[in-house]
Amino acid sequence: MAFEVKATIATFGGQLLKLSHESTSTKTPMAVSIYLPPAASTQKVPVLIFLSGLTCTPDNCSEKGFLAAAASKHGIAIIYPDTSPRGAGIAGEDEAYDFGTGAGFYVDATQAPWADNYNMYSYITSELPALFFGDAAPATNFSAKLDASRVSITGHSMGGHGALTLYLRNPGAYKSVSAFAPISNPSACPWGDKAFSGYLGADKEAWKAHDATHLVGSDVWKGKDLKALIDVGTGDNFYKQGQLLPENFEKAVKDAGVTGVTVRYQENYDHSYFFISTFAQDHVDHAAKYLL
Ligand SMILES: N[C@@H](CCC(=O)N[C@@H](CS)C(=O)NCC(=O)O)C(=O)O
């Protein structure tokens, strides 16, 4: 299925393209944006995927995350997917900010009425790579510009959970991972409890396959060196309310004997894009270490 280019915006020497396409995973139109650095006009560039948090569209991070500044310098493309299907027509999908629209949690729902459309895991891990790295359409032939063999992943909050879990579930698919204020142990926090109950059902065993704190010590992730950078603000109200639980992830990492995980607690920073933009360069630099 071809991309439709909705906007082309010059920024940091490259271009931000706002795209739309019909998705086979969600059975809805999906918005997705891509930042192409200047280097993409002369060579294939590696890719960093940024998974956004609750309520976000591709615009939040591309407008105020400032990842493109460092990505331009390194010659790295950034893909900004949406956070859920929109307009699926499911009763109740727009009732809450933390479930349904804007809150797909990067899982494939198994429960009615969500299972037909809420398939963000497949969307991010299968459909989007096929679209960007395959021959989607002559006018938007990204496969000539992007190097499918060099992809890293990052994300914020719900998207930090997405980045960590997709990375841990797909060894070798991504060169490195990072996260801003990730929901690190969704099975044990109110956001995760609500989302996983709705999308995955009451059996908490099924939740473990989408919980970074469980995955890191499991057979799914076979590596030892995680190549992970995580930032959490100590002034983040969601951290204080126990929605993020990075300490649980750190303990699981230690118990599993996994190395290569840096978790930084940033004094006073909150959950917002002021926090993300402050540390954006560090996260792009982290990805660049493994992509370039
Ligand atoms: N709207 C929610 C907060 C949702 C929220 O903070 N979302 C974060 C991601 S988890 C975000 O990035 N929001 C959009 C933005 O700040 O631009 C509330 O009222 O508590």
Image (cartoon, helix red, strand yellow):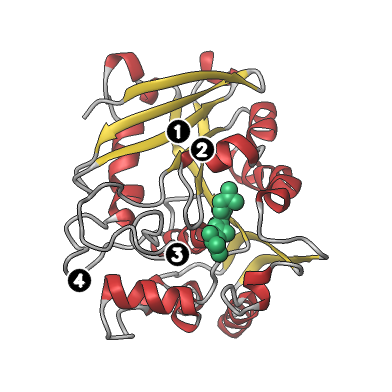
| Mark 2 vs mark 3, CA separation in Å | 23 Å
Which amino acid does the dot numbered 4 rest on?
Answer: Gln
**Front tag of 1 and 3:** 1
First reached walking from the N terminus: tag 4 or tag 1: 1
Distance between mark 2 and mark 1 Cα atoms: 8 Å
- Give residue 57's position: percent from left, percent from top: 45, 44
Discs 1, 3 touching: Cβ within 8 Å:
no
Amino acid type, label 1: Ser
- Mark 1 and mark 2 in contact (Cβ < 8 Å)? yes
* Residue annotated with mark 2: 59
Q: How busy is the neighbourhood of tag 2: few (under 14 within 10 Å), some, or many (20 plus)? A: some
Between disc 2 and disc 4, whose residue precedes?
Answer: 2
> CB of mark 2 within 8 Å of CB of mark 3?
no
> Sequence-wise, which precedes: disc 1 or disc 3?
1
Position in image of residue 102 (x %, y %): 40, 54
**Please, what secondary structure does the residue beneath circle 2 have?**
helix
Q: Earlier in the sequence, mark 2 or mark 3?
A: 2
At mark 4, the secondary structure is: loop
Numbered disc in front, either 3 or 4: 4
Of the numbered discs 3 and 4, the one sitting upstream in the chain is 4
Distance from disc 3 to disc 4, alpha carbons, whole Å, reads: 20 Å
The residue wearing badge 1 is 33
Quarter occupied by the C terminus: top right
Q: Is residue 156 visible?
A: no
Q: Say which of marks 2 and 1 sits in front.
A: 2
- Secondary structure beneath disc 3? helix
Say whether residue 122 is left or right of residue 273. Answer: left
Q: Is residue 36 above or below residue 221?
A: above
Residue 111 is labelled as 4
